[in-house]
Image: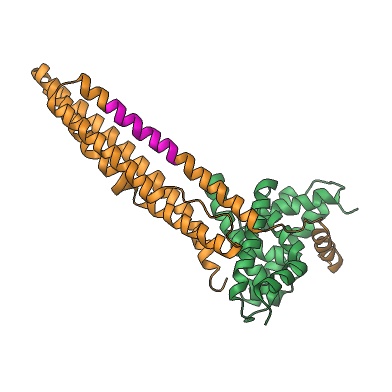
Chain colours: A orange, B green
Amino acid sequence: MINKSSSADIQGLWQSQPTQPPNISPEDFHRKMQKFEHKIFRRNIREYASGIFVVVASVFCAWKLPAPLFRAGLGLTIAGALYVMFQLHRRASVRPAPGDLGLRTCIEFHRQTLERQRDALRGVGSWYLLPLFPGLLVIMIGTAINQWTAHPGHLGHLVMGYGILAGIVGAVLFAVWKLNQRGADGLQVQIDEMNALRGDP
Amino acid sequence: MASCDELYEEAVSTHGPALDRLARAYEADPELRRDLLQEIHLALWRSLDSFQSRCSLRTWIYRVAHNVGASHIVVNRRQSAHELVSIDDIEATEDRSSVANIADRRIALERVMVLIRELKPLDRQVILLYLEGVDAAGIAEVTGISSSNVATKIHRLKNILTRRFQAGGQS
């Protein structure tokens, strides 16, 4: 049987925990925003570095390998990588918050930043994956034709090999798309939380 | 009518410690808990702009704080894949774990904290409000569930808590 004194004991024990005074200020929020901005900045640096690597490697390969279709594929890849870098800058570059914002403006700025990054991640299929697809396709067709010309008797093996390769490339592109959608979902949770607080909690 | 800043100061002076305890119940990691507490205070400060005395300030504060806490659980569960349970599940399995004889109130408190962190958001909200001394009507107002449902949950919670508390030892 539960008596009142034991209930009161539990409540008393709970309420007697030492607590810390709250510490919240625009500086705290600025720090939080900066943390997010640094994360985005580091991600973008990685993406730009990857884009530059793709462009340099493609130029090198185009210089070394004279096959016209292969060269055309590399050209498309270079164009795709440059387009992706441009879109990354346009859609998802870091826009640092001015240091003198008040708390309210600071929060609104952060919400807009989250929305911008969410939209960038949501649309990753159209501005990140799709532009790289034509180059990949033409390179694969180009190398396949080259190999077929060199070994005309092995058409069956060639089709199967490139079928598997296409499947792997497709799976990687899908995984990249899925990961970005998950990232967008995570940002949406934070945005919903901030939006919910505009009306009744 | 009081300004947003005045309301926030009143909220912190009257319920600041309760918010701190609430953050502990939602997050065990001290670093993440500090972030969560800041999130709660930010949300509260921001929400008070639209507070129009349609409910008590206390109800408003707890609703905002629990909304933030519940969102925190959603994000955290994606990372930890930790399954949350209801009061009913806890009550059904409680007897198996309440056999230890630990003569330490601090440990008793820790066990209560572990219990709270296992609960689903709504049950967690009820238990925290109960521990803060909010009556059944107040809990019903904050959570939006019926008073009779609250009374049933509190009855079960008292059973569970008392067993854990006694298992944790009374000094």
Extreme-right residue of the structure: B171
Residue A158, quarter of picture: top left
Percent across and percent down for residue A11 are 80, 63
Q: Which residue appears at 71% of the width and 57% of the height?
A: A23
Q: Which residue appears at 57% of the width and 70% of the height?
A: A201
The range drawn in magenta is: A44-58
Percent across and percent down for residue B158 are 75, 64
Q: In the picture, which quadrant includes the N terminus of chain B?
A: bottom right
Percent across and percent down for residue A64 are 21, 19
**A170 to A121, vertically: above or below:** above
Residue A43 in sight from this viewpoint: yes
Q: Which residue appears at 60% of the width and 73% of the height?
A: B49
| Nearer to the camera, B96 or B51 | B51
Residue A56 is inside the magenta segment: yes
| Nearer to the camera, B59 or B133 | B59
Residue B53 is inside the magenta segment: no
Magenta stretch, main secondary structure, is helix
Percent across and percent down for residue A122 are 37, 52
- Left or right: residue B81 versus residue B93 is left
- Left or right: residue B20 versus residue A199 is right
Residue B29 in sight from this viewpoint: no
| Nearer to the camera, B8 or B150 | B8
- Left or right: residue A63 versus residue B130 is left
